[in-house]
Image: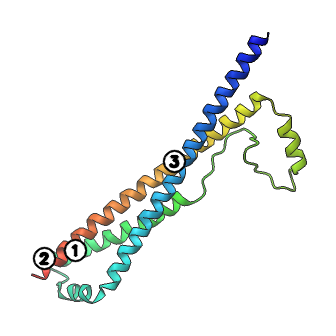
Amino acid sequence: NTNIANATEKSNEIKQSFLSSAISDISRYIQLADTKVYIVMAATVALIVGLFACYEPIETFFASVKPCSWQGVALFILASLLVISTIGVFVFGILTIGSHVSKINYKSKWFLPQSTKEYSFDAYKADVLSMSDEDVIVNMAAELYNLNDINRQKQATNRWTLRSFSAFLIIFAAITVAFLLSTF
């Protein structure tokens, strides 16, 4: 009987260690996604500020382009795509950074949806103290499940942020090349 109890306790420790490590890792992935988006949005703002700092040569360039020429049409299309990609960076970036929730049909003790008036600390403390090892493992598993769902949501919008930023850079480079070619 003692061997079975020790084996069960060891098994619970291994499960808790696994779940704790997994929760820590997935939490870092979620933070990393947010950090990437902050950097992309800051880089986009820096490029836009750089554009506004060079408004005189840019204004001269736009004034020299004939609207109905192939250069004018190409510039209009590229400028429109640049605006769309810039909006995409910020819309998808904000969606990534925004709070995400995962709803499963399980009342976890990890994060509490009730207010402190609905669920007092004393009731919470009593519930936590009455938890068995298995209850703790189930709570940790539910949290890991929720975090994985949140990570999936963030990664989807993060990919679109990066795609929009890539499009922004490519279009920005194309407009820059057109600007440089027009000066020769």
First in sequence: mark 1 or mark 3? Answer: 3
Quadrant in the picture for the C terminus? bottom left
**Mark 2 surroundings: few (<14), some (14-19) or many (≥20) residues within 10 A:** few
Which quadrant holds residue 47? bottom left
Kind of element beneath mark 3: helix
Quadrant that contains the N terminus: top right
- Image vertical order of residue 57 relative to residue 120, above or below: below
Image position of 34 (left or right of 4) = left
For residue 176, the mark is 1
Question: How far is mark 3 from mark 2, CA to CA?
Answer: 43 Å
- Residue 14: give x, y in percent of width and height: 64, 26
Check disc 3 and give the amino acid type: Tyr
Q: Nearer the viewer, mark 1 or mark 3?
A: 3
Residue shown at the point (39%, 57%) measured from the top left:
162
For this view, does 1 lie left or right of residue 140? Answer: right
Residue at the left extreme of this rendering: 184
In the rendered image of this protein, does residue 76 appear above or below residue 115? Answer: below
Q: Earlier in the sequence, mark 2 or mark 1?
A: 1
Identify the amino acid type marked 2. Leu
Asked whether 81 or 130 is in front, the reply is 130
Callout count? 3
User: Residue 63: which disc?
Assistant: none
Number of other residues with Cα within 10 Å of mark 1, as a class: few under 14, some 14 to 19, many 20 or more? few
Q: Position of residue 125 (x, y in %)?
A: 86, 44
Q: Which mark is residue 29?
A: 3
Determine the secondary structure under disc 1. helix
Circle 2 residue: 181
Q: Are marks 1 and 3 in contact (CB under 8 Å)?
A: no
Q: Is residue 55 above or below residue 96?
A: below
- Judged by depth in the image, the label closer to the viewer, 3 or 2, is 3
